[in-house]
Image (cartoon, rainbow, N blue to C red):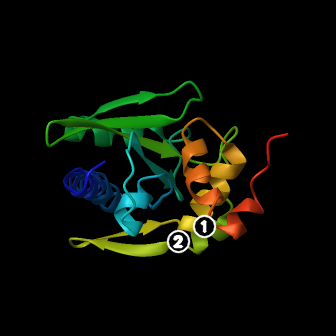
């Protein structure tokens, strides 16, 4: 990804966070940015973003789906659920369809409370967004070890000794 594309990626992430975050703020829904979108947004790392992962901390898409569906309806966003039952939005921003996964501690996903408490605050225009730290993304990626997580861990594994501690070596 080139520098121009990197700036475009960061701007898309910001626009999406402003749209979704503003709607959540109106309804007192707290969230933490937890996925690979933190790489370009917070750390300036070129990364191809496929979606934006928001971890909902004080409401539940499973217990209160109507609330989240209403937000989508009011804003003309598509809403759906993935194979795990987690809800997502799809927003059209600058001619790009961006998926926003609304996550919580269910099934195979577990974000320790300590990671949420240690989240950093990022100001985007007049909206404050909380985000996990890079080291927490690496730990989550190493534990989950999905096709998406593998390149994140691999990128840092060879150069960061503290990451190697969490990554299981292949035999």
Q: Which residue is situated farthest in the top direction here?
A: 83
- Secondary element under disc 1, as helix, strand or loop, is helix
**Is residue 29 visible in this depiction of the protein?**
no
Quarter of the view holding residue 50 = top left
Q: Most extreme residue toward the left, as rendered?
A: 94
Where is mark 1, residue-wise?
135
Q: Residue at x 48, y 75 (%)?
A: 120
Q: Which residue is mark 2?
A: 119
Q: Is residue 112 left or right of residue 76?
A: right
User: Is residue 7 shown left or right of residue 57?
Assistant: left
Is 4 in front, or is 42?
4
Q: Calculate the distance from the C-alpha at mark 1 to the C-alpha at mark 2.
A: 11 Å
Q: Residues within 10 Å of mark 1 (few under 14, many from 20)?
A: few
Kindly indicate whether the residue at mark 2 contacts the one at mark 1 (C-beta within 8 angstroms). Answer: no
Residue name at image x 14 percent, y 43 percent = 94
* Residue 9: x %, y % from top left: 27, 51
In this view of the protein, which residue sits in the foreground, 37 or 107? 37
Residue 139 appears in which quarter of the rendering?
bottom right
What residue appears at the point 39 percent right and 50 percent down from the top-left corner?
A: 47
Along the horizontal axis of the image, is 150 left or right of 91? right
In the image as oriented, which residue stretches furthest toward the front?
Answer: 158
Earlier-in-chain disc, 1 versus 2: 2
Q: Is residue 69 above or below residue 154?
A: above
- Residue 57 in the image, given as x and y percentages of width and height: 54, 58
Q: Disc 1 or disc 2, which is closer to the eye? A: 1
Is residue 59 something one can see in this rendering?
yes
67, above or below 159, in the image: above
Mark 2 residue crowding within 10 angstroms, few (<14) / some (14–19) / many (20+): some
Tell me, for residue 66, which label it has, or none.
Answer: none
In what element is the residue under mark 2?
A: loop
Residue at 32 percent of width and 58 percent of height: 21
Q: How many marks?
A: 2
């Amino acid at each position: 990804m080139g520098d121009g594309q990197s700036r475009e990626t960061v701007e898309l992430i910001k626009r999406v966070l402003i749209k979704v975050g503003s709607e959540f703020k109106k309804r007192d829904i707290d969230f933490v940015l937890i996925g690979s979108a933190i790489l370009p947004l917070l750390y300036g790392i070129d990364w191809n973003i496929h979606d934006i992962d928001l971890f909902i901390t004080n409401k539940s898409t499973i217990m209160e789906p109507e609330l989240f569906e209403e937000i989508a309806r009011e804003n003309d966003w598509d809403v759906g659920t993935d194979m795990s039952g987690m809800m997502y939005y799809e927003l059209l921003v600058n001619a790009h369809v961006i998926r926003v996964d609304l996550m919580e501690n269910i099934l195979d996903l577990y974000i320790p409370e300590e990671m949420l408490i240690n989240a950093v605050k990022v100001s985007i225009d007049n909206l404050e967004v909380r985000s996990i730290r890079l080291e927490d993304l690496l730990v989550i990626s190493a534990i989950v070890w999905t096709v998406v997580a593998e390149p994140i861990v691999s990128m840092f594994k060879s150069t960061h000794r503290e990451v190697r501690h969490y990554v299981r070596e292949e035999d």
